[in-house]
Image (spheres, grey):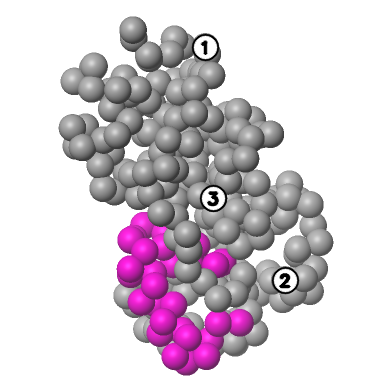
């Protein structure tokens, strides 16, 4: 029996998500001690891998610069030097300081926590250097909101598994995010844990040149049938 789903129907997304989650240990996948540290990490990890962002965070921690006030008042050149391991340090320093200034203007993290998810996302997207992916990572991992991070790994996985309703949902961020959130609403699937599992899967098996023979999802995936 061909278990690939036809275009227009995606009844297997919850099942595929649960099977993927069963393949990986995602506990503590986004290590952070505070909500603001999550927010900093979401910017530092832009266009780099997590070990590089983590090294920059460790440097900030050594200097006790992991609060909005300490980031916003730090000399830009010094901040850039501290976060050098994350790459693009001048750009990211500017973005970190814009984030810190926004948190302070808003009255702190408690005031931001009181905002509903859509309002908080709109506010985040207005901060210099924060796009949809970074905003949703902050919402999901920093504020515990039910937002899916529809990054390139997620769109690749949906496409290869044949789970998307339309091609647009594997090419564009917002259609993919909304599709996954809608289909998984009411299930017990944690969107943050799913994102973590997708990233681990994409980095270890479902790479640009995938190792399909090692994948436990192979029998349900349409990609091996098309290569």
Taking the view exactly as shown, the residue that stands out farthest to the bottom is 63
> In the image, residue 192 lies at what x, y percent?
54, 50
Would you identify the image quadrant in which residue 57 lies? bottom left
Q: Residues within 10 Å of mark 2 (few under 14, many from 20)?
A: some
Q: Considering the numbered disc 3 on the image, is that residue within a helix, a strand or a loop?
A: helix
Q: Earlier in the sequence, mark 2 or mark 1?
A: 1
- Find the magenta span and give its range: 38-67
Query: Which residue corresponds to mark 1?
Result: 8
What residue does disc 3 label? 192
Q: Which residue is mark 2?
A: 109
Image quadrant in which you'd find residue 177: top right
Is residue 194 shown above or below 44? above
- Left or right of residue 35: residue 196: left
Quarter the N terminus occupies = top left
Residue at image position (33%, 44%) is 201
Few, some or many C-alpha atoms within 10 Å of disc 1 (few <14, some 14-19, many ≥20)?
Answer: few
Q: Is residue 185 magenta?
A: no
Is 53 colored magenta in this rendering?
yes
Dot 3 or dot 2: first in sequence order is: 2
* Mark nearer the N terminus (3 vs 1): 1
């Amino acid at each position: 029996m061909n278990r690939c789903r036809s275009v227009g129907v995606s009844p297997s997304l919850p099942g595929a998500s649960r099977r993927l989650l069963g393949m990986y240990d995602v506990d503590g996948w986004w290590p952070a001690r505070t909500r603001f540290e999550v927010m900093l990490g979401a910017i530092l990890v832009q266009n780099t891998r997590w070990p590089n962002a983590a090294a920059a965070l460790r440097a900030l921690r050594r200097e006790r610069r992991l609060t909005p006030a300490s980031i916003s008042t730090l000399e830009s050149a010094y901040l850039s030097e501290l976060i050098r391991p994350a790459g693009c340090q001048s750009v990211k320093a500017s973005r970190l300081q814009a984030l810190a200034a926004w948190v302070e203007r808003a009255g702190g993290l408690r005031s931001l926590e009181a905002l509903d998810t859509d309002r908080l996302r709109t506010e985040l997207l207005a901060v210099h250097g924060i796009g949809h992916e970074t905003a949703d990572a902050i919402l999901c991992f920093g504020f515990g909101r039910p937002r899916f991070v529809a990054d390139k790994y997620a769109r690749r996985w949906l496409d290869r598994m044949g789970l998307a309703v339309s091609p647009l949902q594997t090419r564009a961020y917002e259609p993919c995010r909304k599709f996954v959130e809608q289909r998984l609403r009411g299930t017990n699937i944690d969107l943050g844990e799913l994102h973590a599992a997708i990233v681990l899967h994409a980095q270890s098996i479902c790479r640009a040149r995938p190792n399909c023979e090692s994948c436990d999802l192979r029998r349900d995936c349409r990609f091996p049938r098309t290569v």
